[in-house]
Image (cartoon, helix red, strand yellow):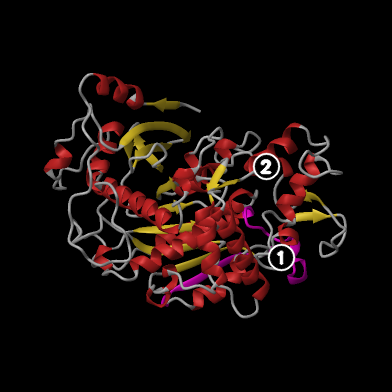
Amino acid sequence: MKLVRSSILLLALALLMTGCGREPVSEPPVPDTGLDLASARIDAEVTAGEIMAASGWEFDPEVPVPDRVSDIDTKCFGHLIDFSREMLAGDVAHYTFLLQIGPGEFDRIKVHRVVKERRPFRPIRTRHAIFLQHGDAVGFVKFLYGQAAPSVPDDHAAAIYLAQHDIDVWGIDQNWVLVPEETADFGFMQDWGMDNQIENLHTGLAVARYTRLFTGNGFRKMHLLGYSSGGWLGFAYLNAEATIPYGHRHVKGYVNADALYKYGPDDEAGRQLNCDDAAYFVEERANGVYEWWVGFAEVGELALSDPEGDSPIFDGFTNQEVGLYFGCAGWRDYPLNPWWHYWGGVFDGDPEDPDTMPIDTRFLPKEWSFEFMATAASWQSNAFFLDYNLISCDEEDVPWDDHLAEINVPVLNLGGAGALAPSALHTLGLLGSTDVQHVIVQMLPDDQKFEDFGHIDIWTATEAPELVWAPLLDWITSHNGRGVGDDDYPLMVGID
């Protein structure tokens, strides 16, 4: 696997010593729209111009380029602080762009692009694009799974699959994904809640759209996929966009990838679980604790490196047993619904009997699941946990659910029968969308849902390309947006 990394960071340091010390560009003033959705915290057009310069991509000569973009000082970028390109499979390339979006050391996001190239550094032009928002623990790397998991084929990855079929795939690593493991002071995470994540997502979408515009793909809106807690974030983002005219929005269609938002009357236990979690995080934050140690990677690494060794996490079990229990029996300790689990498992008895244990994964080699766990980040902000728990607890008035009935974009409910997708039906019924489709992968009879296709199987199972990614591809290519308003450039006011 060939990796090409620019020397932007080193160059920036050198230029700061020789006079390149201007402040990062800021977003130009815009009219006060009174919108619930914050505008991007950086000038997305200028940032897209920096990406164009770093990548060596050619501007479409038919697109009028603003002076502040064409006049970019390529020796002194304002927001782009690192860039990389690597070839993944065949003619599919992966670009990353590390963006400084605020004054703090950790006020950063990483924007990804996975795209087929006509020749090196020349991405194809395509009308079909999607932006991928990850969930808890594991960042964008989950969509590049085969590239990060040594035992998995390199091209076994949803982003690569879509790119091979001419989809322009974009995505984000939220700020918490980029926080180093050795970090000790987490005061900077205090306000990294739902609003912060919405702003980051909005910035990523804006930068992606302007970059697509400059490279000849038009200013078409994008589909958004929100996975797991990224699904909560996706609904919150759509809730904000629903308050503004269609021509101002970034998203034309939404893929709810194994997430829910609101519990129905038959899911009281799940709702109460979220209430209990919210109360816990309120107490943690009152005590000055703003971080959450993920621990996902530790479970996976121990199961890989010493599977038969005694677990330091749970006495009396081996590392492999802990990995399988954590992966295949999630409903026992964290019942988001009565059967929820990460991977479908094979048990040594009836899985509804609490004395039974998973002994293998059902839809992929168990080593693949452990390698997925090992890709996890170290830290998350508990402010985000608190906010999405408050949404699903539904006992406090929060701003992220006020306009669900005004959401009218097409929606695909995508997930596993052994995970959250079946429980999303209540949430989807609260939307104003009339085009709602479902792809819920069920491999076993109804009475075996405790072992059926799970929450992470949709990205990792050996048959995921046929069962999950192909239907996703079909949905993307069959939903082109409204046409009118999809290509407006520049945006009328306020949101870029």
Looking at marks 2 and 1 on the same chain, the residue that comes earlier in the sequence is marked by 1
- Could you say which quadrant of the image residue 238 lies in? bottom left
72 and 460: which is toward the camera: 72
> Disc 2 marks which residue?
368
Residue drawn 39% across and 53% down? 201
Marks 2,1: beta carbons within 8 A = no
Q: Secondary structure at mark 1?
A: loop
Disc 2 residue type (three-letter) = Trp
Measured in 3D between alpha carbons, the distance from the residue under mark 2 to the one under mark 1, in whole angstroms, is 22 Å
Left or right, 141 with respect to 95, comes to right
Name the quadrant of the C terminus.
bottom left
Q: Is residue 315 above or below residue 287?
A: above
Q: Is residue 227 visible?
A: no
For mark 2, does the 10 Å Cα neighbourhood hold few (<14), some (14 to 19), or many (20 or more) residues? many
Outermost residue on the front side: it is 287
Q: Is residue 453 magenta?
A: yes
- What number of labels is visible? 2
Residue 249: give x, y in percent of width and height.
Answer: 30, 63
The picture places residue 380, in percent across and down from the top left corner, at 54, 47
Highlighted magenta segment, given as a residue range: 432-457
Q: Is residue 355 left or right of residue 289?
A: right
Q: Is residue 57 above or below residue 392?
A: above
Residue on which the image places disc 1: 339
Q: Residue at x 69, y 60 (%)?
A: 334
In the rendered image, residue 438 lying in the magenta stretch gets the answer: yes
Give the amino acid at mark 1.
Answer: Trp
Say which mark, if any, is on residue 318: none
What percent of the width, then of the height, locates residue 47?
Answer: 26, 42
Would you call the spot at circle 1 few (<14 residues within 10 Å), some (14-19), or many (20 or more)? Answer: many
**Label 2's element?**
helix
Q: Quadrant of residue 103?
A: top left
